[in-house]
Image (cartoon, rainbow, N blue to C red):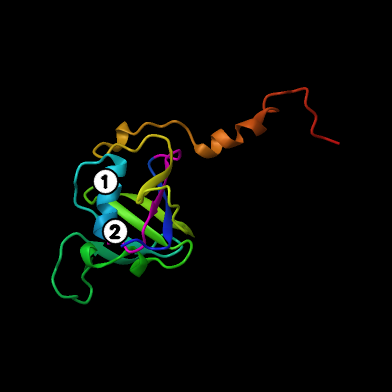
Amino acid sequence: MVMNIIFKYRMLSDESDNFVRDFEVYPDMTLEEFHNFLLKALHYDDCMVSIFKSDAEWRVVEEFSQLDLGEDIEGMPRSMSSVRLMDVNQDFHDRLIYTFDMLNNRSYYLELIDMQRPQSDLKYPRVAFEHAPVPDQYDPEATEQAGSIFDEMMSDYNEFDGDDNYDDEF
């Protein structure tokens, strides 16, 4: 089904300050379809994941699991195959936590940053922006650290560091 709106999510990692991905997807995708798209976009092997809806402080509100436990049971996670993105996120800055390594509690953090009309010349879902290498799926120590994107952007403002001749007193 082609919808007349696209959700744009920004993905960050607490393992690499430099890692950023923006994804543009249809809001009627199931969480399972979204998971499969993310695996492909990150070049990860298939793995068990949970997706969590979170509040503004990244505290878990609700869990969605790959396992279908049948009927909704109070306190148990709902199946990712039966929940669509638009069921979980409807407003700007709504957040998801994508936990791809349950044993080591490794996750990505996704925030809904835009809702826009699809462009006829683009195919969705798609990676709209990428910066820095993806953290290694199996070994967090192998993650390439290329420095902080913040440090890169602010480097132009450090031109006076170490210059003893510069007088900032007026």
- Look at 21% across and 77% down and name the residue there: 74
Q: Residues within 10 Å of mark 1 (few under 14, many from 20)?
A: some
Q: Position of residue 20 (x, y in %)?
A: 43, 43
Magenta run includes residue 31? no
- Labels 1, 2: front one: 1
Query: Mark 1 — residue?
Result: 39
Quarter of the image that includes the C terminus: top right
Residue 169 visible in the snapshot:
yes
In this picture, which residue range is highlighted in magenta? Answer: 16-30
User: Observer-nearest residue: 81 or 49?
Assistant: 81
Q: Are marks 1 and 2 in contact (CB under 8 Å)?
A: no
Residue at the right extreme of this rendering: 170
Query: Mark 2 — residue?
Result: 51
* Quadrant assignment, res 66: bottom left
Helix, strand or loop at label 1? It is helix
Name the side, left or right, on which 130 lies relative to 1. Answer: right
Give whichever of discs 1 and 2 has the lower sequence position: 1
Residue at the front extreme of this rendering: 120
Q: Is residue 109 positioned above or below 15 on the image?
A: below
Quarter of the image that includes the N terminus: bottom left
Q: Position of residue 67 (x, y in %)?
A: 16, 61
Q: Amino acid at mark 2?
A: Ile
